[in-house]
Each structure stands twice: as C-alpha cells, then as structure tokens.
Amino acid sequence: MSGQDAPSLEASIVGIGFWTRGLPDWNAARAFVTAGTLPTDAPARPSPQLLAPNERRRAPETVAVALDVALAACAAAGRDPALLPSVFASTHGDLAITDYMCATLVDAPRTISPTKFHNSVHNAASGYWTMATGCRLGSTAVSGFEFSFATGLLEALVQIATGTEAVLLVAYDSTATGPLGRTSPSSGLLGGALLLVRDAVPGATRLSLRLGNAHSSEAGSRPEAGPLAQLAAGNAMAPMLPFFEALARREGTASLAAGAGRVMDLEFDHG
C-alpha cells in the first residue's frame, strides 16, 4: 500500500531533548542550526539531575546522555516522567563497556566488575530511567543498527496508534572502542528525545508518517548534511539528525533511513 490511500501514524511533539558535545540542550541545537552559534560554556558531559551526585559521576555516558535528554523532553512538556511509557533506541548500547567485558573475560575473567556488567545490557539506560523516576509503565529497548532511530520512532507511533496517550522516545549512542570500534564505528556522544502525544495540541508540531512512504532511495538522493549532521557525523545515532534539523528549521518534511536502500518520509505541521 502506498500513496494517499495508505494509513498514517500521527502524534504531536510536545517536548524535545537534545545533547551532543558543544550543544548541551535543544535551545542550543536550534540556535546552531538556524544561526550557526555555539555556546561558549558547554559542559563536556551530561549531568542528569535525576541521579544522586555519586551515581551521576559513576553512570556511563550512554546512561547519562539518555537520562539527560529524556528529562529535558519531559520538562519541556510539563509531564510527569513516572506516568509515561517509553521507548529507548540505541544502535549499539555501550560498546566501550562491551569491549571491556570481552577483553576482561579473555585476560582475567574473575575480575569482571559487577557494575560494568549490569551497565553492559542494552536496556541499561531504560532501567536507570524507570528506577530514577519511579515509573512502572512499559519501557521498550530497540535496536536496528543504522536504522535504530527510525525503528524507535515507528515503535512509539504504533504504541500511540494502538491506544497509548503519550510515549517518550529516547535515542542515544556513544563512542565505540577496541575491535568493536572497527566493526561498529561510533564516536562522540549524542542523544535526542521526543515526548509524543496522541491528540493535537495548540502550538505543538504535528508529526505524520504515512505507512506507504517507506520507499526505495535513489542513488545520490540523500540531502546535503546539515549543521548537526556535520557536527556529530561520526556517531552511530547520526541518522536521526535530519529529523531534528527539520524541527529546528520548522520545515514541512524530513526523511529517515529506514532499512537497506529505503527511506521513511515524514511530514510536519508546525501549527
């Protein structure tokens, strides 16, 4: 099914969170996209206020960035995190910890750190989030390699289409190291979050995905990389950046990589 006869998935974007090195929040990201300005005092690491200070220091970067953008999206929407189901999307989880685990198992298996072990699972950030917020609602962790953001967005929109009033979508990836860094490269730290709600909200951007619009891409049809895509190009979650650039510019459409040789077309109504 394709074209105007295809069913669509819709939601309103009522909260946005964003973090990458040099751009510590969504306002900074928008200013960078629209005016080319960078803040002069951006922190080197996210500092999620949900965690106690000692936990904040010990949390791996993947957890820190995921919780930081998730809380920012909830705060922007004025929504209680404890009342929101969530979808967490990551291409790799934490490959630096996975590399540590593999190397330690080879060289000194009895010295495996229990803390590193529990942070190695793909849903670690989701677990930290639900415990820190006291949320007892469903949390889904997904991965689709370079199509992970599109996979997470589709999952969130399907949940809304099947009766959920609001869903928090969080996407993130960090630096890969060791042999895994050569087979699944990723650099830097990047996170983005969207708080999506079912109903139309005055002043909020309305997102629409027509299910027939995941189509084959043509060679050379990818648009030129925008400012965010250039700044965080090496990160595994960089395929989500055209979406956030379209939001920052208040454009009417965006395309996401949605599978091998395929793209997902999205429409925005900014009200």
Image (spheres, helix red, strand yellow):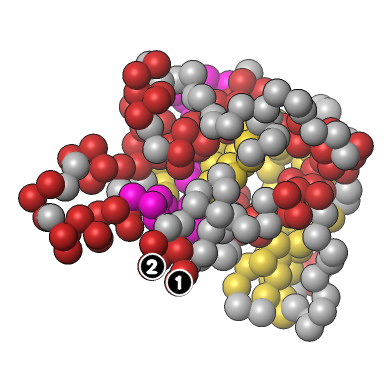
Residue 260 position in % (x across, y down): 60, 78
Residue 72 position in % (x across, y down): 61, 26
Residue at the image point whose x is 19% and y is 42% from the top? 113
Magenta span: 79-97
Residue at the image point whose x is 29% and y is 53% from the top? 100
Quarter of the rendering occupied by the C terminus: top right
Left or right for 173, reference 114: right
| Mark 2: amino acid | Pro
Residue 234 seen anywhere in this rendered image of the structure: yes
Residue 111 lies in magenta, yes or no? Answer: no
Residue 88 lies in magenta, yes or no? Answer: yes
| Residue nearer the viewer, 31 or 182 | 182
Residue 1 position in % (x across, y down): 69, 76
Task: Work out whether 175 lies above or below 27.
Answer: below
* Dots 1, 2 in contact, CB < 8 A: yes
Q: Secondary structure at mark 2?
A: helix
| Mark 1: amino acid | Thr
Residue at the image point whose x is 61% and y is 27% from the top? 43
The residue labelled by disc 1 is 183
Query: Which of the 4 quarters of the picture holds residue 210?
Result: bottom right
The residue labelled by disc 2 is 179
| Residue nearer the viewer, 48 or 10 | 48
Residue 137 position in % (x across, y down): 39, 33
Q: CA distance from mark 1 to mark 2?
A: 7 Å
Query: Which of the 4 quarters of the picture holds residue 30?
Result: top right
Residue at the image point whose x is 73% and y is 49% from the top? 231
